[in-house]
Amino acid sequence: MAILLLGAQGQLGWELGASLSALGKVLHFGRKEADLSRLDELRKLVLTIKPRVIINAAAHTKVDQAEDEPELAGLINAEAPAMLASLAKELDAWLVHYSTDYVFDGTKDGVYTEDDATAPLNVYGQSKLDGDKAIMASGCRHLIFRTSWVFGHHGRNFPRTILELARQEDHFSIVADQFGSPTGVELISSVTALALNQAQRSDQNLSGLYNLVASGYVNWQEYAIYVVRRAIDLGWSLLADPDKIIPRSTEESGRKAVRPANSRLSTEKLTRVFGLTPPPWQYYVDRVLWAWTREYVAANPNPPKILGLKFIPPMNGAMSRS
Ligand SMILES: NC(=O)c1ccc[n+]([C@@H]2O[C@H](COP(=O)([O-])OP(=O)(O)OC[C@H]3O[C@@H](n4cnc5c(N)ncnc54)[C@H](OP(=O)(O)O)[C@@H]3O)[C@@H](O)[C@H]2O)c1
């Protein structure tokens, strides 16, 4: 009775592989082995494996690109999850799925709860919302974790992009009128394992939608400044001066898909039901930066060429928060 992990090569899927292994045998499937746009093959795969848990970390996450391919986004983010939900019901399996802050229009003053009205501003958000609704209507046992601004050690994400930029430019501008909580994949995957374990053992029906983000919030510019400052603390030699990362408006950024100005999510329900309280977002940024630094140092014992480390960072104290 295995745990089927879909999207195993994504930044969250990669981390889930490790966290879930304490719960049972995890079968890892990336896009090549399990393509969510090929529903018939996906159905056959699930019915062959007959998992007791399906974890869906796969999604069409290219938010701007989704504006040009709404059908594909709908297929991967809504139709495939709907089919997984109906298979989970048929097999009496749990389905774990991930939702997004982009289901909201961002006009609320304050944090969004699970009960707030949704109103996506872009194709990606609408397709993800359609997936959430289909799962909730299916009657299968499910956990949907709604998260935001996801980053991890593996894959493309904001901290990685900022560090690449900071190596090349001494100053740049970043959007400062969108607020949210950067959420590390380590947090999402550990909460997934803990909550799933509780839900499977509980006499109560704990199926449902739960917001899952790190605590605290920032705008993208503040987030970028934090990443660059911490990298410099760790010994990275960057061209960018954190004081020269200046604010830019959403309008000026000219992105194809419209993004919500307020992405803040309340995790009160997660704490009330599962007794889990997310730590501050900075904790996970520090861990990722430290992991990249260690990796770089291990791979480059001689004077660094690519990142330009000024010195080998100390082992102690690097994780402390200023
Ligand atoms: N990233 C964020 O900021 C964010 C924010 C809120 C919620 N979420 C949600 O969190 C979950 C995990 O996201 P993530 O950050 O880990 O995204 P990610 O790194 O982009 O991972 C998504 C994975 O899905 C794969 N995929 C795409 N199309 C597929 C298909 N047709 N069949 C099978 N796999 C396919 C991707 O493969 P390729 O790399 O080959 O495309 C990738 O490995 C998703 O449900 C996402 O909607 C993410």
Image (cartoon, helix red, strand yellow):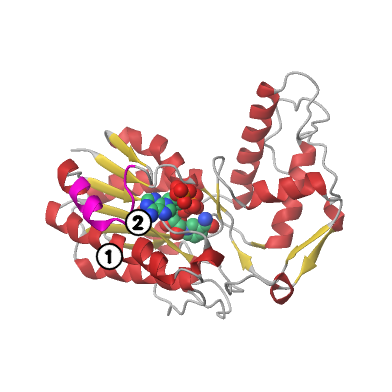
Classify mark 1: residues with Cα within 10 Å, few (<14), some (14-19) or many (20+): many
Q: Residues within 10 Å of mark 2 (few under 14, many from 20)?
A: many
Q: Quadrant of the C terminus?
A: top right
Q: Compared to 246, does 289 lie above or below?
A: above
Asked if the stretch drawn in magenta spans residue 11, the answer is no
Horizontal side of residue 245 vs 17, given as left or right: right
Tally of numbered discs = 2
On the rendered structure, is 49 left or right of 255? left
Spatial distance from mark 1 to mark 2, Cα to Cα? 9 Å
Residue 240 in percent (x, y) is at: 84, 49
Question: In this picture, which residue range is highlighted in magenta?
Answer: 33-45
Chain-order first, disc 1 or disc 2: 2
Percent position of residue 273, x then y: 35, 58
Nearest the viewer among 313 and 266 is 313
Residue 268 quadrant: bottom left
| Residue 251 visible, this angle | yes
The residue sitting at 73% across, 61% down in the picture is 221
The amino acid marked with disc number 2 is His
- Which of 42/102 is in front? 42
Which residue is drawn at the image coordinates 78% and 48% (left, top)?
A: 166
Is residue 79 shown above or below 5? below
- SS for tag 1? helix
Instruction: Name the mark on residue 97.
Output: 2
**Which residue is tagged 1?**
135
Relative vertical location of residue 72 with respect to residue 195 in this rendering, above or below: below
**Residue type, numbered disc 1:** Ile
Q: Specify whether 89 is left or right of 146.
A: left
Q: Position of residue 97 (x, y in %)?
A: 35, 56
| Secondary structure category for the residue under label 2 | strand
Tell me whether the residue at label 1 lies in contact with that at label 2, contact meaning CB atoms closer than 8 angstroms: yes
Mark 2 Cβ inside 8 Å of ligand 1: yes
Q: Is residue 21 above or below residue 73?
A: above
